[in-house]
Amino acid sequence: MTDRAAPLSQPTRLVSVVGSAIGLAIVGDSFLYGNLPIEAANLGIALPLVGVLLSANRLVRLISNTWASTVFERLGPRLPFIAATVAALITTATYGMGWGFGAFLLARIGWGIAWSGLRQGGYQMVWVGAEDVRGRLTGLLWGIIRLGSALSVAMGGYLRDQFGYPFAMSVLVGVTALAIPVAALIRWPPAAHQVAMPRRESSRRGWQTVLRIPRARRLLVVGLVDAAFEGILISTVALFVAGRLGAKDLSLGIGVGTIAGLLLAARWATDLIFAPAIGALSDRLGQSRTIVVLAGMLMVCVVGVTQLWGALVPFALVLLLISSGGLIITLTATANSVALSSERPHLFVGVYSTAHDAGSAVGPLLAYLAGSVVDLSIVYLATTTALLLAVAQYAWLDVRRKAEI
């Protein structure tokens, strides 16, 4: 037992430190999802443009993910990771300046590039662990990162309600600044950057390699639609709560910003609290069956949320957000399994991440475009239906594949 525990202690510590740096750097971005929609008018930003701002960082990642990988490969992780934390500080500070849409858009693009570097550094530190503990280390990494997100939306929403948006942002800028010394103190072992990426294969050929596999194609569609639903839900939860709660429901002094912050905190806390339980469930039940079960739960929760009014809405949304988080965790585990059975495992992980980022980028844009024409309830129901159909197609193909083995 001692022999197995000893090798894990250093990777656990290193991943925890990297996760802490990323968790500190992400607080400004996380805060915006619950508060930018209800603060946009005071910042001189038209509400339809909120979707653009919440998607801009994801759109740029469709390109910057490759940039970050190349920079980390050539320079090693230390300097690019520190630079990413500095960029996170600059963008978070810009969010509080009130310089209008143009400056905010540039800051969101800058954050997207920073996040590509932060995420790349997190993945590379997981390489330090042995193969049989990398799943555990990945869960630890994302649990710590999402703890930062959860604390940000809960604390930031409360500070915004009590003291105003500028004060809340100034506190978050101070928190983000702590990521820089943490990143500077990290000692990256050789194992964290010993894996080299192919240098001459074009990204177009890489996509073609992955798309030749039917199971991979279906999973990419599921991941994209699920990310779009998550983007829609997170970017509109504050507006949905505000629309469903009347003044009498807020009479106890709890504002919409606080409620939305607590809801998003519950969502992101699922990665820390529920990930092990959901992983154990998928091991017992099978990943495809678990995906079907969670997608079904998601539909039930969406139907419930859209039919409720008043104080029951936040409680129903908590269940919806937890189900959504569980589905993302299981899909990530499934993507890892598909990657290991594919011709190019690393390539598939990269393609799946890009598909997920594409869905996350489309989500807020779709929400704010469609939400200006129809009620958000219809947007939620339509997207969940599309997700359920994509999951059913993937699960049926997986059942047939296993029957043929």
Image (cartoon, rainbow, N blue to C red):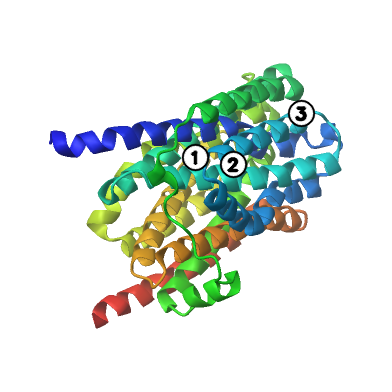
Distance between the Cα atoms at labels 2 and 3?
25 Å
315 or 130: which is nearer to us?
A: 130
As drawn, the label of residue 80 is: 2
How far across and how far down the image is residue 227, in percent? 55, 56
Residue at the location (34% across, 37% down)? 11
Task: Give the number of the mark in front: 1 or 2.
Answer: 2
**Dot 1: element:** helix
How far across and how far down the image is residue 47, in percent? 80, 45
Residue 215 found in image quarter: bottom left
Residue at the location (67% across, 52% down)? 364
Task: Give the number of the mark in front: 2 or 3.
Answer: 2
**Dot 3: element:** loop
The three-letter amino acid code for the residue at tag 1 is Arg
N-terminal of the two: label 1 or label 2?
2
Name the residue beneath numbered marker 1. Answer: 267
The three-letter amino acid code for the residue at tag 2 is Pro
Q: Would you call the spot at circle 2 few (<14 residues within 10 Å), some (14-19), or many (20 or more)? A: some
Residue 344 found in image quarter: bottom left
Check the image and report above or below for 368 versus 88. Answer: below
